[in-house]
Image (cartoon, rainbow, N blue to C red):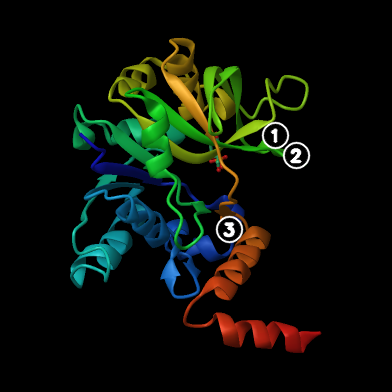
Amino acid sequence: MSVEVVVIPAAGRGTRMRPATRSVPKALITVIDRPTIQYAVEEAARAGVTEAVLVVNLDAANDIEHHFIDEGPLPGLENTRIRMVVQEEPHGLGHAVLTAREAVGDRRFFCGLGDMIAPPTASFYQRLEEAAAGGSAVAVKEGVEDYYDRYGIVSVSRSLDDGVVEMNAAVEKPGREAAPSNLWLVGRYLFGPDVFDHLSALKPGHGDEIQLTDAINAVAAAGQCRGVVLEDDLLDVGNPLDLLKASTVLGLLSDEFGKDYRAFLDGLG
Ligand code: G1P
């Protein structure tokens, strides 16, 4: 059966987005006309997902619930059930995903980080599902510049067709010397429920946090994880400069505003 549920971790404190996040939850920072987390739910809905589990922190829970639920469903999300689970303590991304365990149950699930927005019509989940062959799959990109300190990096045992690789390990922000490849995790994943067992067995890793990448490492070591090498760029909205760039890219791609916005930018010289 195809995957019906997505977990969207959105409990981060947004320290890179201060001072905005003194009063606005990171997930509700706006790009053009909607909060970043809405893009993540919309992308999953485009892939046919009918249930989104948003992992939020206690401070942000009411505002995020208000956005998605209180005034009724948002256009395009009428067929997506949205539920909230609260991560009470900030113990890392892996811990946030583990918080969704009860809501997901024994189903396979997608996971998508709201810090990375997909281009408007793209959805990478379908490619993950095709590549996973019943196991797990993660989307990766070839790195340029300082990716090995910023992202999780995967280790490849074999290349298959169509940009799909078999993996045998993954490591969180290993640094240049220890990076096992130039392929970094972009924040789109497909997991089986077994990942929860791995997550619950983990000790704190990089940054003294429970790392999702360490659970991916365990799944990959068991030969159950494939990587899908993406050509497309996702747009990082987790820090001010990249947020500005993402706003520009999405502004130019917008059906409603793209033409006027381009004319405005051209006029700046
Ligand atoms: C997280 C993950 C990392 C991944 C990145 C993608 O890191 O831990 O493996 O590459 O998202 O954005 P963070 O950005 O939360 O530091």
Q: Quadrant of residue 178?
A: top right
Is 8 left, or right, of 76 in this rendering? Answer: right
Q: Is residue 149 above or below residue 266?
A: above
Q: Residue at x 30, y 20 (%)?
A: 194
Residue 48 seen:
yes
At label 3, which amino acid type do we have?
Answer: Met
Above/below status of 57 relative to 158:
below
Residue 3, image x and y in percent? 26, 38
Q: Which residue does the image show at 35% across and 22% down from the upper left? A: 135
Q: Is residue 252 above or below residue 41?
A: below
User: Label 2, on which residue?
Assistant: 146
How far apart are labels 3 and 2 at the CA level? 20 Å
Residue 204 appears at what percent x and percent y? 49, 21
Where's residue 162, x and y in %? 53, 33
Q: Residue at x 34, y 39 (%)?
A: 110
Amino acid type shown at disc 2: Asp
Q: Is residue 91 visible?
A: no
**Looking at the image, which residue sits at the far front?**
161
Q: Residues within 10 Å of mark 3 (few under 14, many from 20)?
A: some
Say if mark 2 contacts mark 1, CB within 8 Å.
Answer: yes
Q: Which residue is mark 3?
A: 17
**Looking at the image, in which quadrant does ligand 1 appear?**
top right
Q: What's the CA distance linking mark 2 and mark 1? A: 6 Å
Type of amino acid at the residue the image marks with label 1:
Asp
Contact? badges 1 and 3 (CB < 8 Å): no
Give the CA separation, mark 1 to mark 3.
19 Å
- Residue 35 placed where, x, y %? 42, 66
Q: Which residue is mark 1?
A: 149
Crowd tier of the residue under label 2, counting other residues whose Cα lies within 10 Å: few below 14, some 14–19, many 20 or above: few
